Amino acid sequence: MAMRVKEEQILYDARGRKTHVVLPVKKYEELLERLEDLNDLWAMRQVEAEKSITWQNAKKKLRKIGLSTVGAD
């Protein structure tokens, strides 16, 4: 039997505490998409805030940790 929910519903336990939320699928998918967009924005800002280094310095650091063949010119 299909159940239709027009609006969001909050379900409570016997003590009156909120336990679940019932959402229409479209609303749920919209919320997921917004969360993904916010996560992408956060990740972009993290990368933008990182200090960049030159390729030469990157190769030196990689050699120090044993990756001496990386970037062999």
Image: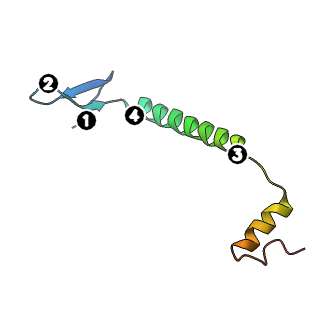
> Circle 1 is placed at which residue position?
2
User: Which-is-in-front pick, marks 3 and 4?
Assistant: 3
Q: Residue furthest left?
A: 14
Q: Is residue 57 above or below residue 42?
A: below
In whole angstroms, how far apart are the C-alphas of marks 1 and 4? 13 Å
Q: Residue at x 66, y 38 (%)?
A: 45
Q: Are marks 3 and 4 in contact (CB under 8 Å)?
A: no
Residue 39 drawn at (x, y percent): 55, 39
Q: Secondary structure at mark 4?
A: helix
Task: Kindly report the distance in space between the C-alpha atoms of the residues bearing marks 3 and 2.
Answer: 47 Å
Q: Residue 43: x percent and y percent? A: 61, 43
N-terminal-most mark, 1 or 4 = 1
Report the residue at 14% width, 24% height from top: 16
Residue at (43%, 29%) from the top-left corner? 27
**Label of residue 50 in the image:** 3
Q: Is residue 5 left or right of residue 62?
A: left
**Viewer-nearest of discs 4 and 2:** 2
Which badge, 3 or 4, is on the more N-terminal residue? 4
Identify the amino acid type marked 1. Answer: Ala
| Three-letter residue code for mark 2 | Gly
Residue where numbered disc 4 is placed: 25
The answer to whether 70 is drawn above or below residue 5 in the figure is below
Between discs 3 and 2, the one toward the N terminus: 2
Q: What x and y, as percent, mark residue 42?
A: 60, 38
Q: Which mark is residue 16?
A: 2
Q: Horizontal and vertical percent for residue 19?
A: 22, 33
> In the rendered view, would you say 27 is above or below 42?
above
